[in-house]
Amino acid sequence: MVNCCGLVSEKNEPVPLKSISVELQVRDHVASVSSRLQYVNEEERPLEAVFVFPLPADAAVCHFSAKIGEQEIVAEVQDRQSARDQYDDAVSSGQQAFLLEESEESSDVFKLSVGCLSPGQNASITIVYVIELSVQADDALRFCLPAVLNPRYKPAASAAGVPEVSSASVIPYTLSLSVDVRSSDRISRLESSCPLDPLEFLDAQHTHATVKLSPGHCFDKDVELFLYYENSHQPSAVVEAGASAAQSGSLMGDPALMISLYPEFPADVMSSLASQGEFVFVVDRSGSMDCKMHHGNDAQMRIESARDTLLLLLKSLPMGCYFNIYGFGSHFESFFPQSVVYNEDTMDEALKRVKSMNADMGGTEILQPLKHIYSQPCYPDHPRQLFIFTDGEVWNTKEVLDLVKSHVYSHRCFSFGIGEGASTALITGMAREGSGHAQFITGTDRMQPKVMQSLKFALQPAVDNISVNWTVPEGVTVDTLSPPINALFQGQRALIYAQIKGQSSEKTEGAVTVKYRLKDQPVTNQLQFTLKPTEDTGLTIHRLAARSVIRSLELEERTGGADAENIRKRIVELSVQAGVSSAHTSFIGVSKDSKETVKGPLLQRRVPVPHMMRGFCGAPMKMCAMAAPNVMQRRCAAPRMAPQLAFCSAMPMASPMARVSPKRKKWLGSSGSGIECDAVSFEEAAQPQKDPLLQLISLQKAAGCWELNASLAAVFGKTEVEVTSRKAAQVDGSVWATVLALIWLHAYKLDQQVEWQFVAMKAASWIRSQKPNGLSQCVCDGNVLLGCQVTEDTLGI
């Protein structure tokens, strides 16, 4: 095999994507992203290239254009089948054409077909999308530019072949990224997973800032940006003027309103944790979980990190709740036939099984275990909480999300995407439809702190009884476009979209009153907004509002709406009107002004990307040579595809699957079974835990106490005799051991408190229940033994 980058011709000559340029414009809580992709046909014959690439799950693509030489082709949104037919007709007649469409199975994957580029011809593709920025646990707004598209796993019965993979080659692309932030709130700072130039403020109020990605960035991982505002919990209402060319009374012609609701939880609410609930932990055990968490030398295997995380979770649960653990791959299994009461015996049994968990269950099929969980009856007064861990992709994302949404009133869903390339559509979608919270563990992130943050959310009360009421002058009405919000939890934000209809000759302002209940306490927020916006803010809010309505209609259609055909027509009509993508429309652009058509047989090329394998297996790889099916019969006959090599990724990212028209095979192919890493043996995976914190936590009893023994003393770096000899005669051995454990945690592991906070709360509660004598002296003696100065109040006992 030849070591060559990019698209490879019959002579092993590359036809690479030359560069990627991204402009990000942030407005409060939403963003518009413009990506310009430069590439060239360096072959001697006309070329068609097919890209399959990721976008964030909730992105609404709103512009697609191509510039060839001095000519620019701006695509328009059409019914999907009509657009496909138009593209095929154009390409088969030698015209230049471009087709962009969303995957039928997953909203975070798009396919771009570039047809009939002449030899030596350059093309510049521009894709623009708008998106809501997600909120992180520390109140940051997160933007992610995906660099990894994992192959979608499909069950063996329906999967196509998967090419073998070997070593890697060099990234041939350059990436430039510029960010412009404007906000009604003061900007505190902007951080990134990649090197940035210094943040530059453009006004004295620090509400407008710009920053750029430092030169020389290798696009070998997701680019994450974290934006911090000073008053992130302050509710806000933003009005955007409609498009002047759009019809009055339509969504795009009328003003659109966006309300941001991000409740702040007072300290007394944060400290009131529930002691009830059913906690179901669903863990991906497919082969890819045997890959490393990141590319550093000290990286854990993903399944190993999952085992450590389950240990923390099991030790942190409150006594008397219910729990169960599921593992899934090509099949699934549960630790118990149904959820069991949490006590010492059930916890010990679960921990024994956790230690033997391996990534040995094949592919990634999550639908069946979810169906089994939902078929189990819920326990009264114990709300069901799902914690789902996966690093992979599934081929039936929309079906999974529909199932989660159909059970939203009986459970909450907290989801965790492990590693670059975890599907944003799947991870964020399950949390959104399950009224929970999504977390992504990428780069050198540790899984445990993020999971424990979500457990804290799960154990805290939620905002409920949410209502939105409008106060507007006569002649004006407001239509809420977003679906109703049932509950909001700590760390969750809701964006509510509305359309302002009509006009008032007198008043120019309206008001919205948002009411909700937090731990039985009523809260009211009233916001003023203008009825006559003048500032040209683009149409970001309009397009996101349209996207919200389209997604609701798509869900209604998939769940068997009584009038599916009319729903489909409404989706197409709104998608075309708003110019945003949907499941039933595509962007189509055809060069009709070209003076001459492209001559000669048309080669079909697919841009392969090994880094999508890296996201799956933890190391960069290269595809072996493979043959492609012939280009469709109605075009000029094409030779079999020449040997091709893969290269490290950049957006757009390619799939090893070809587009075959008119039958149109499904273009999200298989993965899992053919691209799994070598399994780690059980003996290697089950090595004793070396982390002192996890050693200490593993010794805690379900009730919250520790026993005084040599294993506990070893965590402190002492012998059992040293620890026992300092215990006062009147103090019980378990009380002494538990006090020592708490002192050690506060003195030596304070920076990891988010991981052991529930363990410590259980321990403090257990000590208080024992009502021991001489507790103050016990704390003093413990400080002397461990060389610390931790106060009794700090321990909460």
Image (cartoon, rainbow, N blue to C red):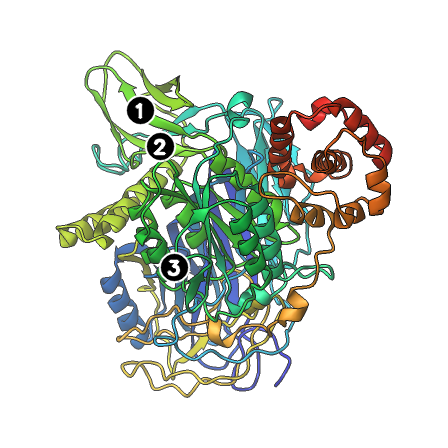
The numbered dot on residue 496 is 2
Q: Is residue 612 visible?
A: no
Give neighbour class at mark 3: few <14, some 14-19, many 20+ (Cα, 10 Å): some
Residue 100 at x, y percent in the picture: 36, 61
Q: CA distance from mark 3 to mark 1?
A: 37 Å
Q: Secondary structure at mark 3?
A: helix
The numbered dot on residue 33 is none
At 23% from the left and 63% from the top, the residue drawn is 82
Residue under label 3? 369
Q: Secondary structure at mark 1?
A: strand
Q: CA distance from mark 1 to mark 2?
A: 9 Å
Please tell me whether residue 268 is drawn above or below residue 380 in the rendered image. Answer: above
Specify which label sits upstream in the sequence, 1 or 2: 1
Q: Is the Cβ of the residue at disc 1 closer than 8 Å to that at disc 2?
A: yes
Q: Amino acid at mark 1?
A: Val
Residue 605 at x, y percent in the picture: 45, 76
Q: Which callout, 3 or 2, points to the residue nearer the camera?
A: 3
* Front in this rendered view, residue 192 or 245: 192
